[in-house]
Image: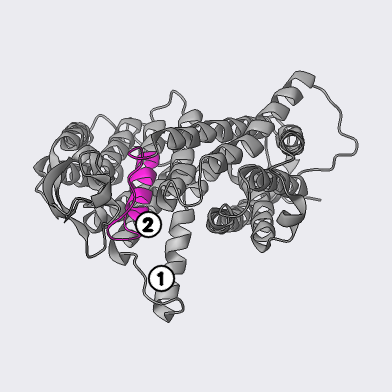
């Protein structure tokens, strides 16, 4: 007999045996951890294996072995009845595009060393995560907080990969615009698949979508391999160590992603997919402490700040909508709304103001010296975008009157980490600097450096966000009026 604590309801009016909340939470944590490190391994191995293996081979490995991982954690195939042929066909097509088409578009537009790995990682993790978050948004005030979490993820991951080296090569949509647009399109294909799986979870039919999607991914890989037989050297791939490492990571990520969705929901997947850069940075911290591979070019303090911001954003995405409600009639709550709205306005103004001044020096091919200064506005710097995310999150908490400790702590962590990462440029390359100068950045022939400019609007925005958050927490703790019915509390 199943005890009451191990019973769940799927909206069908009857008890269904299931794992207890504590066990489910443990399963989600394990699945997210495995998923993050598996995706980090896929990126690290795949970006190196792409130098010698074709896009068709690596995309087929991602689809086939990722599908195998999904099938491992799916229910049994035997005895399943086809109750919705149209839905199965849709899942088959979404699996073909999401499991095979998405990695194929990425590898097809990732050359041996371009676009830079930092840009590829940002676009295929943080950007894909944000796309999936956008697809899950509904007409609920609390979803403003989730949207803000996606902004913090984007700003935090940019703060990480933008500090992986100095001078940084992170300049998305400057040199490889077409290739990187294809990578975003690939993210849409991937997100549509997982949005469909998220809907299937809501009606307790994950396997009914996951199994045909896995079959669709395998079929797409096989058919493409036959169509491009000249580009698919199977014996060479099977003898390539990187191919097997990549395949093992694909199995782990496929299984962990579906398990995370099954136990936690689609937004758990969205938040976790964004974090491989955090995992790679943590491994770098360990490597630098041991000195195993020599000098490390990563600027650890700004990268650490970016990791904290990204984790705060993922927390806002992960947390459920229910929480402790506040009373909007109190003066403190009304004042918090006014301050938070003004903070959002100030943060958006900060995007238009100068934030960094850059100076590039070097030698042109003709031997003439080159020396130029330029200004990056807030829209081209990580800090103002992070400020937008923080202020929008606070405004969402005030409007939805939901103030949980976890959300407040996540925002407090982002506020504390902001000074560490705010001056990260979102591009170091510009079209007016000659290419022969840009390619020598970091050598004795050319250099680029940035200095901070005061951005009062951003400082006002962050101060307003902190003040509104404090007022919201005070409002939450005030005693309720006797004639007001208390709302359910989730601490």
Image coordinates of residue 197 in percent, x first then y, are: 64, 34
Quadrant in the picture for residue 91: top right
For the point 75% across and 25% down, the residue is: 88
For the point 16% across and 46% down, the residue is: 463
The residues bearing labels 2 and 1 have C-alpha atoms spaced at a distance of: 12 Å
Image coordinates of residue 426 in percent, x first then y, are: 28, 45
Q: Earlier in the sequence, mark 2 or mark 1?
A: 1
Q: Residues within 10 Å of mark 2 (few under 14, many from 20)?
A: many
Image coordinates of residue 60 in percent, x first then y, are: 69, 44
Does the image show residue 175? yes
Left or right of 489? Residue 204 is right
Left or right of 222? Residue 126 is left
Does the image show residue 142? no
Q: Residue at the top extreme?
A: 86
Q: Which residue is mark 2?
A: 307
- Which portion, as a residue range, is magenta? 149-175
The tag on residue 285 is 1
């Amino acid at each position: 007999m199943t005890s009451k604590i191990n019973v769940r309801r799927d909206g069908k009016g009857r008890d269904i045996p299931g794992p207890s909340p504590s066990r489910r939470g443990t399963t989600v944590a394990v699945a997210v951890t495995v998923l993050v490190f598996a995706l980090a391994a896929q990126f690290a191995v795949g970006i190196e294996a792409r130098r010698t293996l074709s896009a068709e081979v690596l995309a087929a490995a991602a689809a086939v072995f990722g599908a195998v991982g999904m099938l491992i954690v799916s229910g049994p195939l035997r005895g399943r009845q086809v109750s919705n042929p149209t839905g199965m066909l849709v899942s088959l097509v979404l699996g073909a595009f999401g499991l095979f088409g998405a990695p194929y578009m990425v590898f097809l537009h990732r050359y041996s060393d371009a676009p830079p790995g930092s840009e590829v990682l940002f676009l295929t993790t943080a950007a894909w995560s944000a796309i999936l978050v956008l697809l899950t948004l509904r007409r609920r005030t609390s979803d403003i907080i989730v949207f803000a979490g996606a902004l913090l993820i984007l700003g935090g991951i940019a703060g990480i990969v933008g500090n992986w080296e100095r001078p940084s090569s992170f300049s998305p949509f400057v040199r490889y615009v077409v290739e990187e647009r294809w990578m975003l399109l690939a993210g849409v294909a991937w997100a549509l698949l997982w949005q469909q799986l998220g809907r299937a979870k809501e009606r307790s039919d994950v396997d009914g979508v996951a199994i045909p999607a896995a079959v669709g991914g395998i079929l797409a890989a096989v058919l493409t391999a036959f169509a491009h037989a000249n580009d698919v050297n199977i014996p060479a791939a099977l003898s390539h160590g990187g191919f097997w490492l990549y395949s093992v990571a694909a199995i782990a990520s496929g299984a962990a992603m579906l398990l995370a969705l099954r136990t936690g929901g689609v937004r758990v997947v969205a938040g976790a997919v964004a974090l491989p850069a955090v995992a790679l940075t943590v491994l770098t911290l360990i490597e630098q402490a041991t000195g195993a591979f020599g000098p490390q070019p990563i600027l650890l303090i700004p990268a650490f700040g970016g990791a904290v911001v990204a984790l705060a954003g993922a927390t806002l995405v992960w947390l459920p909508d229910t929480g402790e409600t506040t009373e909007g009639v109190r003066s403190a709550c009304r004042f918090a709304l006014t301050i938070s709205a003004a903070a959002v306005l100030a943060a958006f103004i900060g995007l238009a103001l100068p934030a960094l001044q850059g100076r590039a020096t070097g030698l042109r091919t003709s031997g003439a010296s080159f020396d130029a200064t330029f200004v990056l506005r807030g829209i081209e710097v990580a800090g103002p975008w992070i400020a937008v995310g923080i202020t929008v999150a606070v405004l969402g908490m005030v409007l939805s009157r939901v103030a949980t400790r976890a959300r407040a702590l996540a925002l407090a962590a982002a506020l504390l980490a902001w000074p560490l990462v705010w001056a990260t440029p979102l591009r170091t390359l510009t079209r007016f600097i000659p290419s022969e100068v840009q390619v020598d950045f970091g050598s004795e022939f050319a250099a680029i450096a940035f200095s901070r400019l005061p951005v009062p609007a951003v400082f006002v925005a962050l101060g307003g966000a902190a003040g509104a958050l404090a007022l919201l927490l005070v409002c939450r703790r005030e005693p309720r009026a006797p004639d007001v019915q208390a709302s359910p509390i989730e601490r």
